[in-house]
Amino acid sequence: MAKRDYYEVLSVTRTASDGELKTSYRKLAMQWHPDKNPGDKACEARFKEISEAYDCLKDPQKRAAYDRYGHAAFENGGAGGQGGFGGFGGDFTSTFSDIFDDLFGGMGRRGGARSGGRERGADLRYNLEISLEEAFHGKTATIELPTNVACETCSGTGAKAGTQPVQCKTCQGTGRIRHAQGLFTLERTCTSCQGRGSVIAEPCKSCAGAGRIVKERTLEVNIPPGVEDGTRIRLGGEGEAGMRGGGNGDLYIFLSVTQHPIFQREGADLYCRVPVSMVTATLGGEFDVPTVDGGRSKVKIPEGTQTGKRFRLASKGMPVLRSRDRGDMYVQVAVETPQKLTKRQKELLKEFDKESSKDTQPESAGFFAKMREFFD
């Protein structure tokens, strides 16, 4: 029976991003997993089909080859048996990339294939939103994420319990196949074992030979005091489990700090805008302001305080990450103009204006003097 199109199997379009591929794969894998459908051969076959499709499309090189040649890219030596560049057979780019692998580190890759095809799992990203107060105090957050974990049934080997992967007969365990072309000897990845050097004769039924299954995990993340928006926390080995017992990838927690209704943050410093009455700004006074640690501080303002004047509260800002220091807090005064005045209040203000002089409003007097000089 002809194989279905891999994109159709994963229910995505050919322009799907890596993230869309992964999301669709996880959803389908959890739906058709043999553990959720015990004894159902059709579900087991569908799970294998989904895993095969994702294993191909998640690899940029394999996906490019599949987009160009379809399933024929992995049959008869690749590229559907058609001649590639200059009659070498197969795809020119992949063939010569194998040659450069030999010269610049390919031996290390083949060594990995001989070790049973253990491939390191993918790194994962998790976006976590916290408040400014949580960024100040730090916290231990509990997160849940679905990811690939090592199959418990086969201990991550991918082989049926009591069996082990066997050496690939095509490449004799090297993961590579040599082709003699005149004066050249070309080497490429073995198509029988996909470069792993071994094959599984009897796949594990729980993971269909992948050595891992999709599972919901619960983790605790320690967030230190002083983290900023965009801070990245790395949890080594908490990413996806590798194929067939390969090492785990890493998990990266990206933090975003929500906007605060009172404070604005710049580094370790905090800024707070406080409206004060015209009378308080004129005669001087004091008021309390909240601090991010849950306390309060008193701010005294002198007579004649103008809008925009800042007052510094030392060490009342955010903690400096991995330090005992703290930033400062700056209180900016905004003089509020009275609204909805009574008739008597308006009369009093007019009387005050008549009594005003250059000394009481020096900034206004200076500006209008310069303006008169400009027009003269």
Image (cartoon, rainbow, N blue to C red):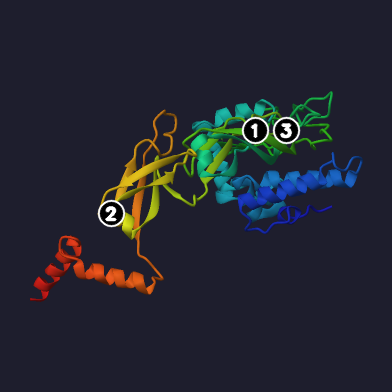
Give the quarter of the image for residue 192: top right
In this view, the mark in front (2 or 1): 2
Disc on the earlier residue, 2 or 1: 1
What residue is rendered at 57% in x and 42% in y?
Answer: 95
Give the spatial CA distance, label 2 vs label 1: 74 Å
Residue placed most toward the observer, 292 or 241: 292
Give the quarter of the image for residue 122: top right
- Is residue 206 found left or right of 55 in the rendered image? right
Disc on the earlier residue, 3 or 1: 1
Looking at the rendered structure, the secondary structure element under dot 3 is: loop
What residue is rendered at 69% in x and 35% in y?
Answer: 218
What residue is rendered at 59% in x and 50% in y?
Answer: 84
Give the spatial CA distance, label 3 vs label 1: 20 Å
Residue 119: numbered disc: 1
Residue 283: numbered disc: 2
Q: Is residue 82 visible?
A: no
Q: Which residue is disc 3 drawn over?
A: 170
Q: Amino acid at mark 2?
A: Leu
Q: Amino acid at mark 1?
A: Glu
The relative height of residue 337 versus residue 276 in the rendered view (above or below) is below
